[in-house]
């Protein structure tokens, strides 16, 4: 597919607030991206006209019930069969922060056996409790399956900010060890919180800002085409978004977050 | 028939409850002999159903489909017929 033929759907509902920044990231890469309200997609029934979907960050429906839960059920009920076709065709779906919560609540991630009827994981309340907003490092752990990180060397620590109150990735106690093993064996583990030298956080706050199991910051589905992460790559796209750029001798042109969007676009082009 | 359901969503045993722990600390600071504090969420729902059995089935389904995430949540509920 030629770059100019790519069309990214950035979904939004009430409470979404990272759609414009996400669109700007694609604009910078010369890719057509459109912010579309979920109701419009449902009405037009044209989800399959898009090359990729992004569910951006925000506080959809006030984070009521659980963050992402209401949007997830709405998508499942009103857009379920189209979304399933989209996912089964291997078209990329990216969920950032609230988008990650939606993908987990909708059963698309981890999606061990395809889209699950009930969530197989949760993004629970942060430990320590509270909204955490700050820059973190995440280590790229994927061995090559995730299409969203193809341009990132394995082991590289990316500096990207997080901003959430419900980001503690967990599995159920009874399945924790088996699911973690499955995640690693399937090459679904993508990012883990680490320090600037790529050393794992080992649960230590604030290197791991939310108490996530196994320091998990981002995972993909078994085919690597659906990816969710708590950090915000769209807020680390340009050099001027870095918190310390004024202290540097030369401001870098881009931040680490851009690598995720670049990788995604490259993979769509190759299809 | 109209029914009123009271649904409680609580954390499963062994899962961290940072809200409960923080609240317990505050209650201790106020001088209360607190051992533990657990936080749960209560929904009060009114619904129409043909029978109590059907109301039970519907509320159970609501819990499984939306109100609880089986990874970390337990749910329980009571149902009463409204006059």
Image: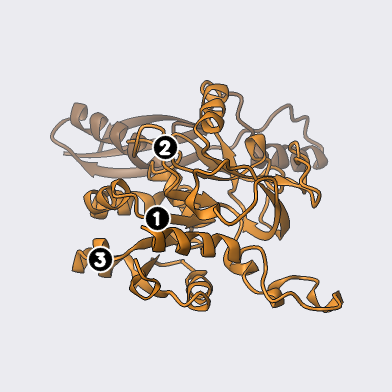
Between marks 3 and 2 in the image, the one whose residue lies nearer the viewer:
3
Left or right: residue A242 versus residue A18 is: right
Answer yes or no: are tags 1 and 3 on the same subunit: yes
Crowding at dot 3, Cα within 10 Å, few <14 / some 14-19 / many 20+, comes out as few
Residue under label 2, please give it: A119
Disc 1 to disc 2, how far (Cα)? 20 Å
Q: Assess disc 1: are there few (<14), some (14-19) or many (≥20) residues with their C-alpha within 10 Å of its C-alpha.
A: many
Q: Nearer the viewer, residue A63 or A229?
A: A229
Q: Is residue B72 found left or right of A163 in the rendered image?
A: left
Q: Chain of mark 1?
A: A
Same chain for mark 3 and mark 2? The answer is yes
Q: Which mark is residue A49?
A: 3
Q: Position of residue A267 (x, y in %)?
A: 44, 58
Question: Which SS class for mark 3?
Answer: helix
Q: Which chain is orange?
A: A
- Secondary element at image label 1: loop
Please tell me whether residue A22 is drawn above or below residue A70 in the rendered image: below
- Location of the N terminus of chain A by quadrant is bottom left
The numbered dot on residue A92 is 1
Q: Spot the brown chain and give its letter.
A: B
**Which is more N-terminal, label 2 or label 3?**
3
Q: Which mark is residue A259?
A: none
Residue furthest left in the image: B50
Q: Are marks 1 and 3 in contact (CB under 8 Å)?
A: no
- The residue under the point 69% across, 42% down is A127
């Amino acid at each position: 597919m030629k770059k100019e033929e790519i069309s990214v759907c950035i979904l939004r509902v009430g409470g979404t607030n990272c759609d414009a920044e996400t669109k700007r990231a694609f604009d910078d890469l010369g890719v057509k991206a459109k912010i579309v309200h979920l109701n419009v997609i449902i009405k037009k029934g044209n989800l399959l006209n898009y090359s990729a979907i992004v569910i951006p960050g925000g506080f959809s429906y006030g984070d009521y019930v659980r963050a992402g839960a209401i949007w997830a059920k709405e998508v499942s009920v009103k857009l379920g069969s189209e979304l399933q076709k989209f996912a089964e065709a291997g078209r990329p779906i990216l969920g950032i922060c609230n988008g990650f919560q939606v993908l987990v609540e909708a059963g698309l991630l981890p999606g061990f056996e395809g889209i699950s009827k009930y969530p197989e994981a949760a993004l629970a309340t942060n430990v320590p409790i509270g909204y955490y907003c700050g820059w973190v490092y995440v280590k790229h752990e994927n061995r090559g399956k995730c299409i969203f990180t193809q341009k990132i060397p394995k082991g590289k620590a990316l500096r990207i900010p997080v901003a959430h109150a419900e980001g503690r990735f967990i599995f159920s106690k009874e399945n924790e060890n088996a699911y973690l093993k499955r995640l690693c064996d399937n090459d679904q583990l993508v990012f883990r919180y680490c320090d600037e030298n790529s050393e794992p956080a080992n649960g230590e706050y604030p290197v791991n800002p939310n108490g996530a199991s196994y320091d998990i910051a981002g995972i993909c589905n078994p085919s690597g085409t659906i990816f969710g992460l708590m950090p915000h790559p769209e807020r680390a796209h340009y050099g001027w978004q870095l918190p310390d750029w004024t202290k540097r001798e030369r401001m870098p042109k881009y931040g680490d977050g851009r690598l995720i969007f670049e990788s995604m676009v490259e993979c769509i082009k190759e299809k | 028939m109209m029914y009123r359901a009271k649904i409680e969503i609580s954390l499963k045993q062994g899962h961290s409850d940072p809200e409960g722990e923080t609240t317990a600390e505050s209650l201790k600071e106020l001088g209360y002999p607190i051992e533990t504090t657990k936080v749960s969420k209560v929904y009060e729902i009114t619904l129409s159903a043909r029978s109590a059995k059907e109301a039970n089935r519907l509320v159970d389904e609501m819990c499984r489909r939306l109100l609880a995430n089986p990874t970390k949540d337990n749910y329980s509920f009571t149902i009463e017929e409204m006059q």
